[in-house]
Image (tube, grey):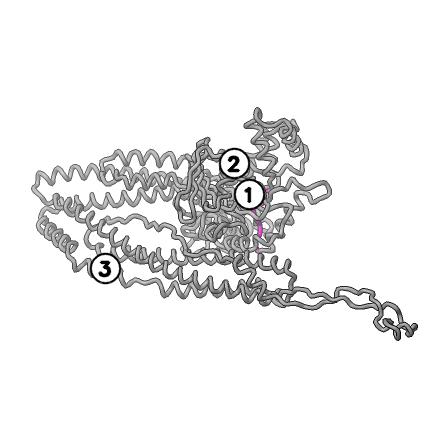
Amino acid sequence: MAEIFIKYNPYKLETIVRIDGERVADNSELNVGDKRLQEWVEDLPMLLQEECNEDSFYLTFQGTLMDFEDLQESVEEAKAKGIMINLTHIPAKEVAHMELAIEEVFDEIIHGPIDELKTKDLQDAFKKALNSEFEITVVATMSAGKSTLINALLQRKIMPSSQEACTATIARIKDTDDQEFYAVAYDEHGNKITSVNDVKLEDMASLNADEKVSTIHIEGDIPFTSNEEMSLVLIDTPGPNNSRNENHLKTTFKNLDESSKALVLYILNATQLGVNDDSKLLDAVANSMKVGGKQSKDRYLFVVNKIDNFRKGDDDVQQSLEKVRKYLGDRDIHNPNLFPAAALPALDIRELMKNSDTIDEDLEDEILMTARKLNRNQQLHLENYATLTYSTKKKIFDRLDQVGDNDIMNLETALIHSGIPAIEETIKLYVEKYARTAKIKNVVDTFHKKLESSRAFEETKNAIAKNTEKHEQIRHQIAMIEEKLNSGEEAKKFKGKIDVLDIMPEVKDETKKVLRQQQKEMDKFLTGTIDQEFTRHEAETFINNLSNHANQSQAKLATELEKLIDTKLVKTAMHLLEEYKNKIVSLIDGLETEEIFLEPFQLISSEIDFSQEKSRIMEAAKYTERVKVGEKQIRNSERQGFFGFLKFWKPKYVTEDVYENREKIKAQVIADEYVVLIQEHERTLAKSIELHAKEELKKLKFDYNRKFETVDQLLRDKLNELTQFTEDADTVQLLIEVSKQKLEWLEKIERKVNNIIEIEEVAYAFK
């Protein structure tokens, strides 16, 4: 039986794999490089089987508890394939330890002897990395209880949840641990409209109803987490059919895209599956989950809400969840993370626990009855059905043990059974596993870049000072470099290289591909409807469905093209950096350029205004058809008059068919008219995108030219400082002593920085 050792460091994205004491070969499939464990852990048992040609293994894993639990899950699933793995865990340093060490090192850096490490820019970069935000996008189908669930997480009623007040804006709720909530409302152009202190439910309802308001930024306490660990941001998005403008839908699709790292709460109504308004959103989810391994799957939490609403004789919880699995499976979403929930009871229970003195007596009785129902009915102990890791499940059941499970009126127990605490614990686990480890890596990388630059400069000073016989030559070289830097000729050459850079041909080609794909999706949507004829009511339903499909398609198109252009611009920015490095690489070591940051840009497009076109298209598609609707008895005309009276053998009454004109509306004409509108809008959107890409490229070139001028000046300052090391012997000796002390300090700090994200590889014994 092969003995496997795996050491995985999530802070360095470094994996070591040994089989029977020997590291795996560079060309082995088990050599996973700098991938996250979640990208390869599901394949690990099969990879071991192929590598060793065995079905049983001893596996020792050194790493964090969270990563070990993912490995446990993979090992458990491998049993069904006949692969048996005996698993042992060697613990590693956890996230909280790392964050404390980072703060200590940073404090030492800003109080150290290197002036360039004390700059405001570095301090701002550190604070930004350490206090970074983590977004959680909340998406829901119609009437799924999205606002109620957000209120349950916030432990207060702040988001309007009535059917009439369903979300039409984007609300961005940032955790600041402040008990009072503060809100600022903006229009679609980002202009501030108003702000509200101590925000209440009625304030949010008013802002949501205001047609001028596009987004609302809110700050306050998200109680189940602390902003000292990570600033969570809940993004409450409008439903697919209720967005106030196209940018809202675009935000939703952008956060569902595989390139996004946002956690997604996708809320489904347990009593109303299969609505049409979520088909494109689920398509986007399915595509995203296919890329990136387990992390892509982990970032989607499917909350099955209102599962407590079934009456006796209806589906039970397990049957309902199986229906959800099938519903998602039919859309190519397999093994989803399901979390059954009763959001409204959870919210009411939390309101009663916090404000028992102010709640109406009748409402209190109603809440207590709901709590009793959750406690008494074993089937409604929803935490038992949630997709939880071992450690998360243990936390939930430890809470149950602490509060006791005997009193059927116990509110804390009922709250746990509502499923909401299970969702909260899973969010915290995801943040710790992915966001906080990534944050630590980013901060340490920032330290490394700055420290390496400073060390290279100090080493250059020492090298110059020690080569006393070459001081004249070095002064001459510095003068030559300064002359080149000050020369307009060098700047002109470099500017010429920047000016010829052009991304537009690639953008146009890619845009055409995306537009062709959009047309295929529209054709697929219309399949089977073209030959139909509708009544006016049926035609209006068809047009509304077509409108919703088109609006979601436009948002998806905008998202894909924005990502395309962003990729091209980043590629261009990297090329500019490379050109600049090539320009000065021979001048001085240790040149360091700050990380690229591109602000997200807004695509210039507006939602198709179907309301103005509906009447015209309906009239164009309408025609009148004479249809028999019944029969009636009328006097026989042949029995009229004198001679008619004599025709006694003829009946007095005869049957006559009754006809009326019926309005019919052709689906083909509606489809043809709408497709023309959609294609026209898409062409306009594509033109706008191309124009915007040109402007962004122009801005990028301007910004980088300006940045490079700043770095040129920094280089001049460093060259001037280096010149001092070629002065008289006494001055040089003093400078060498200072530089030596700085180098010793830098080496000590670098060791501390390296140790922050190190998990020691301890000796291990084969079984």
Q: Position of residue 387 (x, y in %)?
A: 57, 43
Tell me the element at label 1: helix
Provide the residue designation for mark 2: 201
State the predominant SS element of the stretch in magenta.
loop
The residue depicted at 24 percent of the width and 43 percent of the height is 454
**Foreground label between 2 and 3:** 2
Q: Position of residue 29 (x, y in %)?
A: 46, 55
**Foreground label between 1 and 3:** 1
First in sequence: mark 1 or mark 3? 1
Q: Residue 165 shows which numbered tag?
A: 1
First in sequence: mark 1 or mark 2? 1
Residue type beneath disc 2: Leu
Tell me the element at label 3: helix
Q: CA distance from mark 2 to mark 3?
A: 56 Å
Of residue 381 and residue 206, the one placed in the foreground of this image is 206
Q: Is residue 451 left or right of residue 380?
A: left
Q: Is residue 401 magenta?
A: no
Residue type beneath disc 1: Ala
Provide the residue designation for mark 3: 495
The residue depicted at 13 percent of the width and 51 percent of the height is 478
Residue type beneath disc 3: Lys
Hey, which quadrant is residue 116 in on the image? Answer: top left
**How many residues crowd mark 3 within 10 Å: few (<14), some (14–19), many (20+)?**
few
The residue depicted at 44 percent of the width and 36 percent of the height is 196
Q: Is residue 726 left or right of residue 560?
A: left
Q: Residue 516 shows which numbered tag?
A: none
Q: Position of residue 535 (x, y in %)?
A: 65, 61
Q: Which residues are magenta?
A: 332-339
Can you say whether 748 is above or below 660 in the image? above
